Image (spheres, grey):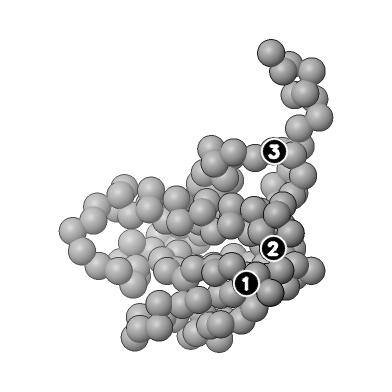
Amino acid sequence: MKFWKRGKEKKDEGSFEGNKNFLDFLKSARLEMEGLMDQDTEWFYHLPYKGAMSLEKAKDLEIEKRAVWRRVIYDARRTQLAGLRWETRSDDLVCPECQKMDNRIFSFAEYDTLNRMVMHIGCRCNLVSVRE
Ligand SMILES: [Zn+2]
């Protein structure tokens, strides 16, 4: 039983304190993506990836991608990783905004800045560990 620890947990959005599990990231990511989807009700038709995916599946995928992205930043901070490199898919579908970020390295000191950025719906970029 760890009830006494509950009061100490911080659940602030964007806070690096506390001990988040992936469900916390999924909850935050759902709010973030639903906010973006409210702003662009045609988002499903603008996705860079096409296929036989339903709107509901695509929404789940977008939420999961965003949760993973946020967790990567959180873990990098927690483990004091030297940096994170923004990597695009390097294909014709990369949007101009993401293209500008391609190979940009965010140092440990810039993780907050990185975590405040809001990537577009359908972003297929990844964050790659930089160890030196
Ligand atoms: Zn992107």
Residue occupying the point 30% across, 49% down: 57
The amino acid beneath tag 1 is Val
Q: In this view, does 47 lie above or below 79?
A: below
**Marks 1 and 2, Cα distance to the nearest angstrom?**
7 Å
The quadrant where residue 17 appears:
top right
The amino acid beneath tag 3 is Asn
Of 42 and 93, which appears nearest the observer? 93
The amino acid beneath tag 2 is Leu
Residue designated by label 3: 19
Q: Which quadrant is the N terminus positioned in?
A: top right
Find the residue positioned furthest to the front.
132
The quadrant where residue 104 appears:
bottom right
CB under 8 Å between discs 1 and 2: yes
Q: In this view, does 28 lie above or below 120?
A: above
Helix, strand or loop for disc 3: loop
Q: Residue 81 carries which label?
A: 2
Q: Residues within 10 Å of mark 2 (few under 14, many from 20)?
A: some
